[in-house]
Structures are given as structure tokens and as C-alpha cells.
Amino acid sequence: MKRVFVRTFGCQMNVYDTGKMRALLAQDGYAPTDDMADADLVIVNTCSIREKPEQKLHSFLGEAFAIKRSADRLVTVAVAGCVAQQEGNKLLDRYPQLDLVFGPDAVPSIVSMVRAAQDQPVLDTTFLDADDYVFTSELDPDAKGAVGAFVTIQKGCDNKCTFCIVPTTRGTELSRPSAQILDEVRGLVAGGVREITLIGQNVNSYGLKVPGEKNFAALLYAVAAVPGVQRIRYTTSHPRDMGADVVQAYRDLPQLTSQLHLPVQSGSDAVLRRMKRFYTRDGYLRLVDQLMDARPDLALSTDIIVGFPGETDEDFEATLSLLETLRFHTSFSFKFSPRPGTPALKLLERDEAVAPEVAQARLVRFQDRQRVISLEQNRLLEGQVVEVLVEGPSRHDAGVICGRTGDFKMVNFPGDVAQTGSFAQVRVTRAFTNSLRGEPLRPWVAAPSPSASATA
């Protein structure tokens, strides 16, 4: 049997694409391996949203090519994902040992591409027309027996955020037919999946370009109606497109978890305008108020970019004050990273760059304060009983299992790995910045699923 090794960098969309590649390759006789040295096919699925993940590609290829040179068999090396889409033939020119380069739209053709690449280098970075694109329906082999799974609902993005390379690397937005989405959800639930995460670059705009298709809120209700779906999450959500019907879903659907990732990027209106986010700080705050009214226990997380071109000390202080006001449970914060072909580069040409040392100091300040707030938020749960969906054994402690609450808090507590996939009632005994420690209620209590209170 042939073996395939896949290294995945980047977002949930890349994780999902990797699963589809494994599913398609399994039909051609490839079994997954965790040891790159044993692989007949090595794929790196890349991310170009920031510079650092892109740099990881080149280090990884050095390892892959060393294995390819020393192997006593044919080893095919491929680069997939957003860097492949962005760089295309430049990668083949730079690395003569590279066999295959393909972008996200080419994932459904991976079997034929791999076969062709065994004879000569193959490049496929073509964006398909909406009428020609086919979403892969095969289920990721790793999803069998898993507790949670991603389900893509769209590809590409029509927004033009000035810092973002996604429209360049993943193309225009295309919504996946809701019938296909629901079929995949049913298949995953039949395999034991309890938690579904709907993913897309801007899930709130799902279906709006397709006459007669469900919009995103209607899709949430339809997924919740699938028997066996016990939790629903989604990412990523653009604040501009969050409608009142989605807010209402938080009132109506107990399966919709009490956790929302709502990227704000900056707390400064001036920076938001330069980013072309098309909402204001006050508009974001009003939206959060509406969401909290619908689900008072909602745990909010966000994305933050510091050091965006033209960001002043006052702009950064506005971002810090937003953190203090909303007290995000977690955030993903980064220094601005110039990406090829993005409109933000024109701002740099106007000498609006923030000095690297200034950007770094701002990032440290923001992250230091976020860690304090995250710990304070978690400490509010000490002594409380939370509902945990068990995901498996703890990575660090024998006899300890772990899982997440509905608001995405990781909880470690004593238990048996056989409880994976079940719901547990756990009393939180200690809070940390990124996780909780707890003790299960005795005797063992299986929580109602989905929780009627939707407060886990």
C-alpha cells in the first residue's frame, strides 16, 4: 500500500482541504502515515495569510527533499494551498526536486495530478468558474470516530480587506449547495461526530449570491435539525454581514454554542477605514450588545492586527480600550504582515509604516493584557459545574481526559478514555489562562444533549 504524509499550516479551511485530499487519495490506495520518511507522497498544505507560515514551507521542503534523495523508491513531493496559488511556477523554478504545485481549487483533482507528477512536474493554480467547481463530498477518513468535524460551506471571499491575501489565493466567494452540506453533516453524525463546525471565509454571506438558496441563518436551523447534531460552531464571521436572523438563532438553537469568534482587527475607526472593514467601533459594540442580549453567556474571541500602516499611538490605545470594554475571552493578535498584491502595500509606499520595534512593543502590551483578562474570565468558572464534550486523553497526564465546554474552554479532569464522545458534568476546581482543571460529578452523570440551558 502507498503511503501519504501531509503537513498542514494555517486555517481551518486548510485543515478541511487536507482531510479531503486524504479521502480522495485513499480511493487511489494511499494510506496516511505520521512518518514522512515512510511516505511515497509528501504534501505540504500551505498558508500565506502572514509571512511566518510561508517561511515554514521552505524549511519543510528541505526535510522532504532530503528524504526524496535518500529513498530507494519514488517519492513525490507536492506543495498545496495558498502559497502554491500565490507563487505557482516560481516554486517549481526554485526547487527542481518539486513534483507538484496546486492551489485550493485543484484539490478535487489531486489523484490525477499525483499520477501525472510521477512523470513530469505539474502545476495547477487555475481558478474554476462557479459552474465548473465541484465541492468534494468524500468524508475525511480521520473524521470516523472523531468527536467534532469541520464542514465547509463556501470557498473564496468577495471582501476586499486591504491587509488580506485570501481573495488572491482562494478566489471569489462561492457557496456550497446546502443539500450537499446537510448530506455531509448526516454522514459525519452517522460516523459518531457530535460537534459540527461550519467553516468559510465569511460565513455570514453564505447563499446570498444564489437565488433560492438558504441564507446562513436558515442553514444553521437546518443543521440543527439533523438528528444527532449536538453542538454547532462556525468560523469566520464578518461583523459587517452579521444579520438579525443569526442573532435570533442564538435565542432559538440550543445546539448553537455559547462561543463566537468575531474578528474586529482594530478598535480604531481610522484604522478600520484603512483596512476597508466597512463597520465602525460603535457598530461592532452595538452588534455585540445584540448578541449578548440573545445569549448572555456568550464567550467572545477576536482577531487583532497591530502596527497596521498609519496606526498611531492613539489608534492602538483605542484597540486596548476595546479589549477592556469587551474583555474578549481569547484573541489571536499579530503584527501587520505585508502580503504580496494586497492594497495595504500602497499605504506602505506612502511612508505610513509603523516601525518594527513599535509594532512589537504594542503587540506585547496587547497580549500581556489579554492573558490577564483570559485568566480572569476563566477564574469566574471556578466552583461552577460545566458541561464538557469529552474529546479524548490529555496530552500531558495519564488518567486524565479532556474536552471542551460549549464556550470552547478546554477542561482537563480525571476519567477514562472510553468516555470520549460523551458529555460530562464537571466542577471546575482551578482556572489557568488557556484551560481549566476539574473533577467530574460523582456518580458519573451523562448530561442531556444538547443542553437545554445552552449555558455550558
Image (cartoon, rainbow, N blue to C red):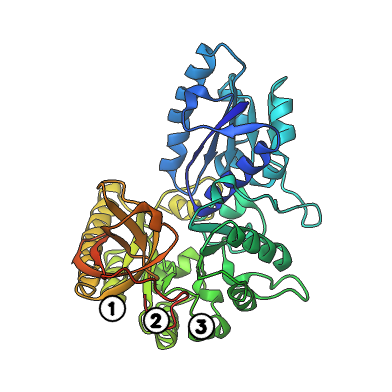
Q: Label 1 crowding class (10 Å Cα cut-off): few <14, some 14-19, many 20+?
A: few
Residue most toward the right? Answer: 131
Does 44 sit above or below residue 229?
Answer: above
Q: Residue 316: horizontal and vertical position, in percent?
A: 29, 65
Q: Amino acid at mark 2?
A: Leu
- Indicate which label's residue lies in the foreground, 3 or 1: 3
Q: Determine which residue is flagged by label 1.
A: 325
Corner quadrant of residue 110: top right
Of label 3 and label 1, which has the lower sequence position? 3
Q: Residue 360: horizontal and vertical position, in percent?
A: 27, 51
Q: Label 3 crowding class (10 Å Cα cut-off): few <14, some 14-19, many 20+?
A: some
Numbered label attached to residue 285: 2
Of label 2 and label 3, which has the lower sequence position? 3
Q: Amino acid at mark 3?
A: Val
Give the CA separation, mark 3 to mark 1. 21 Å
Mark 2: secondary structure: helix
Mark 3: secondary structure: helix
Q: Determine which residue is flagged by label 3.
A: 247
- Comparing 392 with 49, the one in front is 392
Q: Is residue 354 left or right of residue 183?
A: left
